[in-house]
Amino acid sequence: MSQQKFQSQDGKVQLVGAGPGDPELITVKGSRALETADVIVYDRLANPDLLSITSEESEHIYVGKRPGKPSVSQDQINHILITKAREGKKVVRLKGGDSFVFGRGGEECMALKAADIPYEVVPGISSALAAPAFAGIPVTHRKVARSFTVVTGHTIKKSDSFEEWEHLAKADTLVILMGMRNLPNITERLISFGRDADTPAAVIEKATYESQQTVVATLATIADEAAHLSSPATIVVGELASKGKELNWFQKESIEQETTTNEKFVTNFAG
Ligand code: SAH
């Protein structure tokens, strides 16, 4: 058996969820996969700091959006994954959040399966969960929300189905990804399908990064109040979104406020 043939039998692809941003939020399994990978194919929402744990010899291929340049198509990405695995390489396809949550992981698995390339999926913490968590917004809560729904806000203009919006307007907690550009349309649509305009709503921008920003308002006001925030941001609609005010534990301002209060307390106490 030639060396080449032996190698090509060893090649495989691991679809690894990088988590929402904070590099510590990748799984242990995901980080081990990165450490031992020959090739890492990554995109915009995977925190590039994670590449620092890869081996020096590893090859890094960026396939995310590049301003002013044509983006790499899904077919091209599939081609890269297949070609590198056929060379006998251990390939990590690194995606922001979880690969199977609006991450095209399904398409990549289908392409790999068709090409007879072994693959594994290492789940990641999706921003759909991490953004509310880092804003202090539980997505379920006894007696308040027994379920949560995750939806893309990207296709709202195309999806005019009455049933879909009637259903979304009734969700206990609605988590919307890729919704910032369409936020005014989304809130209008939810209200027109019966959701109370006073329902709490929150937008969490760059969740889990130090620069995270959160705005908590109502369905009627959130589009204006959060107009200064931009992608990547996660929108949460439902009673529990109001918890973002009282349970916020992460953002700098509140930590600073606490420190000042503590210092004051200490000063007063000492004085
Ligand atoms: N697979 C990813 C989602 C990809 S879709 C996941 O599981 O998280 C991209 C959308 O995810 C963005 O438009 C935004 O709505 C959301 N998103 C990703 N990273 C985020 C972050 N750090 N903070 C807030 N939202 C984020």
Image (cartoon, rainbow, N blue to C red):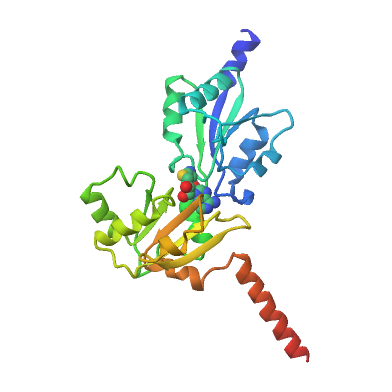
Number of numbered discs visible in the structure rendering: 0
- The location of residue 251, given as percent across then percent down, is 60, 65
Q: Could you tell me which residue is drawn at 71 percent across and 40 percent down?
A: 52
- The location of residue 252, given as percent across then percent down, is 63, 66
- The answer, for residue 125, to whether it is visible in the render is no
Closest to the observer, 171 or 112: 171
- The location of residue 41, given as percent across then percent down, is 58, 31
- The location of residue 192, given as percent across then percent down, is 25, 60
**Vertical order, 166 against 246 (above or below):** above
- The answer, for residue 179, to whether it is visible in the render is yes
Residue sticking out furthest to the right = 271
Q: Could you tell me which residue is drawn at 50 percent across and 29 percent down?
A: 119
**Vertical order, 41 against 227 (above or below):** above
- In the picture, the quarter occupied by the C terminus is bottom right
Tell me which corner region of the image, top left, top right, bottom left or bottom right, holds residue 7. Answer: top right
Residue sticking out furthest to the top = 1
Question: Along the horizontal axis of the image, is 121 left or right of 40?
Answer: left
Question: Along the horizontal axis of the image, is 104 left or right of 29?
Answer: left
Q: Could you tell me which residue is drawn at 59 percent across and 41 percent down?
A: 30
**Vertical order, 121 against 205 (above or below):** above
Q: Could you tell me which residue is drawn at 63 percent across and 8 percent down?
A: 2
Residue sticking out furthest to the bottom = 271
- In the picture, the quarter occupied by the N terminus is top right
